[in-house]
Image (tube, coloured by chain):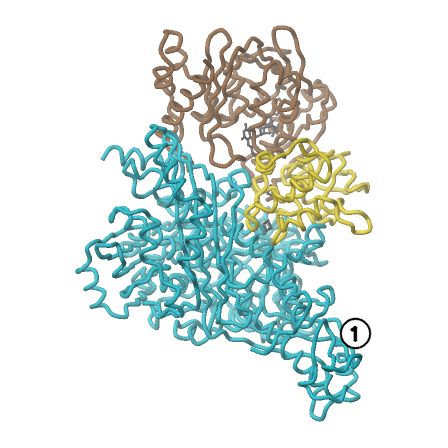
Chain colours: A brown, B cyan, C yellow
């Protein structure tokens, strides 16, 4: 498997990255490369220029900023998994990171890459959606903060414009309980269905692989708000959601799994 | 047989560490893809994206102009290279239909993956880049995908044949008696099982490197193959190269499981192109390409019927199956169902037996032998059906088996299918297994769980298998129309410095023959293991051989080594007697030294004998120089390993997920040379069988597209999904060979699939579930429960 | 473009296309063929090497991304005199390999796992090797080998 040809430059700073990405319409950032390189090997992605942001070590950090935690976009999954700060303040994120792919993938993949890729089958985006995180991006027109709910738009589509760089992920504190259920057949695989449930004041529920992007379960959240039991709320989990069918599960089975896993997750919360 | 050398401590039966390992562990061993020769060309094979289509046009113009490209060929360009079509060595019936099959498809493509063009370029990247520029125009025809549909001939894979049926093969010694057995039976169970298609997925993809010697006119072919000897003969015939001009070498080979037991288009293409371009030609398979281009296994729709009396004792077994050949017949494609044909009554005594197989073509990758080949299918059918019978009769699955097991006093057992089972004590083996598992206790636990209303169900699965291996007595192969023999050859040579060289015709690719064969020789000759080297897998060094597959290597190849060693020892004894001026009967042999009985100090070590044989200064009259012997051993019968495999699973009723809690096996493979290797073979085999039950299936859509050729989608399980295994053994030596060995390469795979499936159905039987198709994915399990509860 | 890195302690510089995968750089440009390729979807782990001490799938890293990195491959484990690393030895003693094709990757993944995880047990080893496929051994003896080596290397619970 050989990617088709492309040019390659290393970004020396955030500004440099922005400049380089603007130089070519078909250019793409590469962080860990663990979403991009597999696609390029099959020539499903054929960027003409790669701007490597892997050397921007300043963007690799996990900080306590009072009411929220700030995670640099280039923080690798393995660092999220093993961070003592996260394990103390936001253990859910460490746990979810520990379920991504396999150790080798976690040694390379970055949280920013995972979020920017915006794959509905990815674990971290759905978890961040349930956590009401927000994404900090910088681009030619400056720095902006995008709430997770507005960030994931569709199949591999996010609110980032092609010339914007995701630099940080802000996750609010105050999670009183959480649950993450990843259902798959082999440990290394992507979730067939995943459910992230978070209690932080209200209860939020988000799904992995129930649609082309990470999704919030409005049916379940509405039901809970109006005082429904766990069973009733779980029953409404897939309301308005039409999950895909693939080799691992039909759409119908995904709906069923979503309900079962939501119920189990909610039971763990209480 | 002749006497065994008396020795203090024999290595046989010891866990001797493998000599193959250090080089593999250090990354020093060379696989085909590791070989690079200066000036080698690389090829890329462009494959059909249509399952059944006429090729309207192939435009290679742009590809030919692409950087680094030396040539681009389509079928018509290479016709002059072939002296004949690709070989199928097993015409199972006289009227079997075997359409001609060439390395590149000519006017019609017949499966997704069928080769349509080949790019020859300097570098592999350049070949791939150029292939992307080739444009093929197809006129698509309806694809034949479903087996039972294929048998109806609505659409044809090969129009010229007028049918999709390649052959019908039947074994029915006494049809009237069989009919009577069924009509007089108290119980009849009729089951239909599907053996899904599997991708063998040896971890090393295939690879080929053909090197021509332009002056001498000969060729060296390196290939990731299990069958260098068979490949040499077949490639020579197909390419019109004199057999003497072709040397085939299988370097380190990363697993095979049957997928490298073949003669492939790419091997022939590399040879032909190296002949044409007078340069070395290389090809290394991509994994997703291999999913389409390397043979698949299994692929059957099985109907099995059991007739039983009021006690559940079997009266008759009747089997009818359709087997998926794929688009073409590869090396032994049609023969695979026959390797199971004789075993559909399993370990149970029955008088009446009937079997019928229909081989049909489909627009899919050709099938061929995959670990177990025919025997996993047979074992699956009978073991699942025995559970169905137990449910019908209303007895425990263990009890129904006990009532029907072939008894020890029935051995050698003349089977209703015409085989002679060599040896066994089935009831004893079965009891050991059930006791070790704590079978009755688990049944109690299961009952308690059910009573508690738990939605995590416990299931216990039994699988008791017998297989025939040690392929094979050549005369039996003749009766099955197989085009070759089943012998194996070995040469044992004591060199002047008393080091020993063993040359074997087997072709190991993970089985550790270098270690085991050395152990056999060390045991007989009493020389240190380190002094013995084992040579193999190079037709220039080991010119005779029938290679490695069908759990044959130890029982046939190992026996050849053993017999050759005996012959060497006989000669050494004659020579020693001559030198010591005593008669042979006065000699004792121990730890590598001949000594004269009762005369302390009158000794001659083997080293001395070897040197005398080498100098030939003082040999007995008529004795040839050198201490060596060659043997070709043709076994008088198959061997019949057997064993009980037990699985304990937990099924989550809500999600359909199956968790394997325990797996225990008690195997009987006769005597064991190296238990370390035996255990390893069982472990690996078990996982491959479990994989069929729970994870793996080559899925085709209605248009004949293979949906999961990669390892991301084709679910080969990892360590995380598997438990550790509880292994035990019973030992019933085989009388078929002097080593008393049977074979263990396929046992685990043959046994484990039905153990798992029986366990899952057992877990859910109280909900009314009687069958689940494989692989038992969460969704399949969940649906089976929904369907059962609904009805 | 020029790409340099240290592999098994030796500095290499090669001129390669940006699309060169690290695994091809190691195998073809540098000529260390112990690292294998078993798939094209980053699934099998046969290509696992250590990059700055951590296991990575070298088929999923561009050589240019490894500029300046320290790479350890299977060839870099044994002592110069050929004495096997305790982990390699454990694989042999436990019969943790058959055809040996998955082995280099399996060993490198295990090494990273052992170093990062004090207190390994069977479950953790199995999960830690989720990204490495073996078709021969059924994993039983691989797990045994890793636990034995972890013990010997003094990092087991
Ligand atoms: C075998 C395998 C298994 C996997 N299994 C899982 C799994 O189970 N669950 C899961 O969630 N993920 C899984 N992944 C994906 C993994 O998590 C990826 O690492 C992650 O999705 C992408 O991170 P990266 O840094 O590698 O991104 P890259 O591949 O470098 O980039 C991905 C995309 O994001 C863009 N990008 C990257 N960083 C930025 C940035 N800072 N700003 C703007 N754009 C950016 C790139 O241009 C590219 O389009 C798996 C990957 C592999 C190879
Ligand atoms: S070759 Fe890298 S994961 Fe398979
Ligand atoms: S030892 Fe053969 S694949 Fe692991």
Residue B616 seen in the current view: yes
Q: State which quarter of the image contains the C terminus of chain B.
A: top left
Query: Which residue shows up at 46% across the image and 43% down it?
Result: B708
Numbered disc 1: what chain?
B
Left or right of B290 in this view: B586: right
Q: Is residue A151 above or below residue B365?
A: above
Q: Which residue is mark 1?
A: B497
What element does badge 1 sit on?
loop
Foreground pick, A104 / C153? C153
Left or right position of C109 against B478: right
Residue B528, placed above or below residue C49: below
Image location of residue B182, percent across then percent down:
20, 60
Q: Quadrant of ligand 1?
A: top right
Q: Is residue B663 above or below residue B576?
A: above
Say which of B772 and B55 sits in front.
B772
Say which quadrant the N terminus of chain B sits in. Answer: bottom right
């Amino acid at each position: 498997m050989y990617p088709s040809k492309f040019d390659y430059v290393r970004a020396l700073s955030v500004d440099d990255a922005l400049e380089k990405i603007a130089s070519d319409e078909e250019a793409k950032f590469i962080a860990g490369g663990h979403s991009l390189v597999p696609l390029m090997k099959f020539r499903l992605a054929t960027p003409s220029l790669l701007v490597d942001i892997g050397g921007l070590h300043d963007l690799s950090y996990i900080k306590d900023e009072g009411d929220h935690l700030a995670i640099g976009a280039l923080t690798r999954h393995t660092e999220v998994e093993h961070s003592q700060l996260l394990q103390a303040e936001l253990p859910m994120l460490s746990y979810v990171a520990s379920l991504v792919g396999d150790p080798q993938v976690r040694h390379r993949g970055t949280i920013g890459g995972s979020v920017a890729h915006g794959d509905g089958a990815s674990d971290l985006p759905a978890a961040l959606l349930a956590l009401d995180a927000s994404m900090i991006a910088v681009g030619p027109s400056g720095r902006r903060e995008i709430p997770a709910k507005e960030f994931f738009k569709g199949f591999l589509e996010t609110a980032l414009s092609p010339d914007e760089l995701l630099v940080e992920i802000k996750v609010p504190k105050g999670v009183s309980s959480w649950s993450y259920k990843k259902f798959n057949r082999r440990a290394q695989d992507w979730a067939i269905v995943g459910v992230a449930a978070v209690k932080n004041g209200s209860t939020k529920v988000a799904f992995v692989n129930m649609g082309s992007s990470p999704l919030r379960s409005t049916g379940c959240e509405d039901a809970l708000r109006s005082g429904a039991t766990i069973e009733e709320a779980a029953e409404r989990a897939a309301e308005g959601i039409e999950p895909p069918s693939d080799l691992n599960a039909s759409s119908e089975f995904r709906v069923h799994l979503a309900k079962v896993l939501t119920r189990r997750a909610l039971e763990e919360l209480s | 047989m002749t006497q065994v050398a008396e020795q203090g401590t024999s290595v046989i039966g010891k866990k001797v560490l493998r000599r193959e390992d250090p080089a593999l562990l250090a990354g020093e061993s060379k696989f085909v893809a590791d070989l690079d020769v200066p000036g080698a060309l690389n090829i890329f094979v462009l494959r059909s994206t249509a399952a059944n289509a006429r090729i309207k046009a192939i435009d290679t113009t742009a590809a030919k102009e692409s950087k680094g490209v030396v040539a681009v060929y389509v079928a018509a360009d290479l016709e002059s290279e072939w002296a004949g079509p690709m070989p199928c060595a097993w015409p199972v019936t006289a009227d079997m239909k075997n359409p001609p099959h060439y390395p590149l498809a000519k006017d019609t493509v017949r499966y997704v993956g069928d080769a349509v063009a080949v790019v020859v370029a300097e570098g592999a990247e350049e070949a791939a880049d150029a292939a992307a520029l080739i444009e093929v125009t197809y006129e698509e025809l309806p694809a034949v995908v479903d087996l039972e549909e294929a048998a109806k001939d609505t659409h044809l894979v090969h129009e010229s044949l007028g049918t999709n049926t390649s052959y019908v093969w039947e074994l029915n010694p006494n049809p009237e008696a069989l009919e009577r057995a069924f009509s007089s039976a108290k119980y009849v169970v009729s089951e239909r099982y599907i053996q899904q298609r599997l991708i063998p997925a040896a971890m090393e993809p295939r690879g080929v490197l053909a090197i021509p010697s332009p002056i001498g006119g000969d060729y060296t072919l390196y290939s990731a193959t299990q069958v260098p000897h068979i490949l040499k003969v077949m490639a020579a015939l197909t390419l019109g190269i004199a057999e003497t001009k072709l040397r085939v070498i299988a370097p380190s080979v990363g697993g095979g499981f049957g997928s490298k037991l073949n003669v492939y288009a790419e091997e022939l293409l590399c040879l032909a192109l190296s002949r044409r371009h007078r340069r070395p030609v290389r090809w290394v398979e991509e994994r997703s390409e291999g999913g389409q281009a390397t043979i698949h296994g299994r692929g059957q729709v099985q109907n099995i019927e059991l007739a039983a009396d009021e006690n559940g004792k079997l009266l008759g077994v009747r089997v009818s199956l359709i087997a998926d050949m794929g688009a073409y017949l590869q090396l032994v494609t049609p023969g695979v169902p026959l390797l199971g044909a004789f075993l559909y009554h399993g370990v149970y005594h029955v008088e009446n037996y009937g079997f019928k197989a229909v081989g049909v073509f489909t627009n899919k990758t050709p099938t061929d032998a995959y670990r177990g080949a025919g025997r996993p299918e047979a074992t699956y059918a009978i073991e699942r059906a025995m559970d169905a019978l137990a449910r019908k009769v209303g007895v425990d699955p263990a009890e129904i088996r006990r009532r029907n097991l072939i008894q020890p006093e029935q051995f050698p057992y003349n089977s209703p299918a015409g085989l002679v089972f060599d040896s066994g004590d089935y009831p004893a083996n079965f009891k050991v297994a059930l006791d070790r598992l704590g079978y009755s206790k688990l049944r109690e636990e299961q009952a308690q769980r059910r009573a508690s209303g738990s939605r995590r169900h416990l299931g216990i699965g039994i699988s008791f298998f017998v297989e025939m291996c040690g392929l094979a007595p050549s005369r039996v192969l003749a009766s099955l129309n197989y085009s070759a023999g089943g012998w194996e050859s070995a040469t044992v040579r004591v060199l002047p410095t008393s080091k020993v060289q063993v040359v074997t015709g087997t072709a190991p690719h993970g089985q550790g023959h270098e270690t085991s064969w050395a152990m056999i020789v060390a045991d007989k000759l009493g020389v240190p293991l380190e002094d013995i080297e084992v040579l193999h897998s190079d037709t220039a060094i080991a010119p005779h051989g029938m290679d490695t597959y069908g759990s044959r290597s130890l029982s046939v190849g190992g026996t050849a080594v053993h017999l050759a060693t005996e012959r060497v020892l006989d000669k050494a004894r004659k020579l020693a007697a001559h030198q010591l001026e005593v008669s042979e009967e006065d000699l004792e042999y121990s730890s590598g030294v001949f000594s004269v009985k009762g005369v302390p100090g009158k000794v001659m070590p083997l080293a001395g004998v070897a040197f005398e044989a080498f100098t030939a200064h003082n040999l007995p009259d008529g004795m040839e120089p050198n201490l060596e012997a060659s043997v070709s051993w043709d076994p008088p019968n198959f061997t019949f390993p057997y064993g009980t495999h037990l699985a304990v699973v937990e099924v989550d009723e809500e999600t359909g997920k199956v968790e394997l809690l325990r797996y225990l096996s008690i195997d009987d493979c006769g005597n064991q040379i190296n238990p370390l290797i035996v255990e390893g073979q069982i472990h690996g085999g078990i996982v491959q069988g479990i994989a069929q039950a729970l994870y793996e299936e080559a899925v085709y859509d209605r248009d004949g597209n293979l949906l999961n050729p990669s390892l991301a989608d084709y679910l080969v399980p990892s360590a995380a999904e598997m438990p550790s295994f509880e292994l035990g053994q019973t030992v019933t030596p085989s009388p078929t060979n002097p080593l008393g060995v049977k074979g263990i390469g396929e046992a685990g795979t043959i046994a484990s699939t039905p153990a798992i499936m029986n366990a899952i159905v057992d877990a859910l039987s109280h909900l009314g579930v009687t069958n689940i198709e494989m692989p038992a994915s969460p969704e399949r399990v969940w649906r089976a429960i929904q369907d059962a509860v609904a009805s | 473009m020029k790409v340099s890195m240290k592999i098994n302690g030796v500095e290499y510089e090669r001129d390669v296309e940006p699309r060169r995968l690290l695994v091809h750089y190691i195998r073809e440009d540098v000529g260390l063929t112990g690292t294998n390729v078993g798939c094209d979807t980053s699934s099998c782990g046969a290509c696992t090497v250590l990059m700055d001490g951590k296991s990575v799938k070298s088929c999923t890293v561009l050589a240019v991304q490894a500029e300046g990195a320290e790479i350890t491959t299977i060839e870099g484990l044994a002592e110069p005199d050929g004495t096997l690393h305790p982990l390699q030895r454990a694989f042999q003693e436990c019969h943790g390999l058959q055809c040996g094709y998955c082995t280099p990757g399996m060993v490198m993944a295990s090494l990273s796992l052992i170093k990062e995880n004090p207190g390994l047990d069977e479950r953790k080893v199995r999960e830690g090797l989720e990204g490495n496929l073996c078709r021969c051994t059924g994993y039983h003896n691989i797990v045994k080998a890793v636990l034995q080596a972890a013990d010997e290397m003094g990092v087991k619970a």
